[in-house]
Image: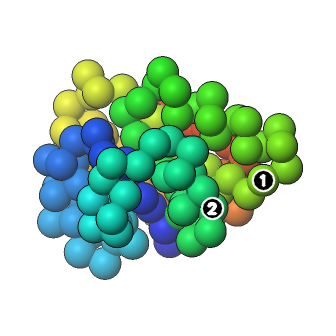
Amino acid sequence: MLRLLSDQNFNGDIVRGLLLRRPNLDLIRVQDIGLAQADDPAILEWAATHNRIVVTHDRATMPSFAYDRVVNDKAMPGVFVLNDRLSVRQAIDALLLVNEVTEPAEWAGLVAYLPL
């Protein structure tokens, strides 16, 4: 099972839908851990420390900061970027699929744009 961290701008309806469909999903929100106002590098640092893949809609800055970590040999468990124009159902289905059929190590150092 993947360990996920949703960033501050990630659609709450998607988070709620994921947890309704998979109550045991290992997903926490930055708002729940005191990082609601944190910048992308701080979120990525926390995610690396706690071995969590970041889930975001932020295509503008999050991928660049994630790749900066990789280039500088820092841990980066992965980032899933979902287009904010996806329907809630499409986003939920995409995240549940990767959760069911992949392992955390497969995403290390990668930024993936979902759906695949």
Q: CA distance from mark 1 to mark 2?
A: 8 Å
Which SS class for mark 1?
Answer: loop
Horizontally, residue 46 falls left or right of residue 26, namely right
Question: How far from the left and from the top, in percent, is residue 21?
Answer: 20, 64
Q: Which residue is tagged 1?
A: 74
Question: Label 2: how many residues lie within 10 Å, few (<14), some (14-19) or many (20+)?
Answer: some
Amino acid identity at mark 1: Lys
Which SS class for mark 2?
Answer: helix
For the question of whether residue 72 can be seen, the reply is yes
Q: Could you say which is closer to the camera, residue 52 or residue 92?
A: 52
Residue 2 vs 11, above or below: the answer is below
Total numbered labels:
2
Marks 1/2 in contact by CB < 8 Å: the verdict is yes
Question: How far from the left and from the top, in percent, is residue 39?
Answer: 46, 42
Q: Which residue is tagged 2?
A: 48
* Residue at screen point 17% across, 55% down: 17
Horizontally, residue 109 falls left or right of residue 64, namely right
Residue 34 vs 66, above or below: the answer is below
Residue 103 vs 13, above or below: the answer is below
Question: How far from the left and from the top, in percent, is residue 78?
Answer: 61, 50
Amino acid identity at mark 2: Ala
- Return the disc, 1 or 2, that comes first in the chain's sequence: 2
Horizontally, residue 47 falls left or right of residue 17, namely right
What is the quadrant of residue 15 in the picture? bottom left
* Residue at screen point 73% across, 44% down: 69
Question: Label 1: how many residues lie within 10 Å, few (<14), some (14-19) or many (20+)?
Answer: some
Q: Could you say which is closer to the camera, residue 58 or residue 104?
A: 58
* Residue at screen point 41% across, 30% down: 58
For the question of whether residue 95 can be seen, the reply is no
* Residue at screen point 23% across, 75% down: 23
Question: How far from the left and from the top, in percent, is residue 4?
Answer: 44, 61
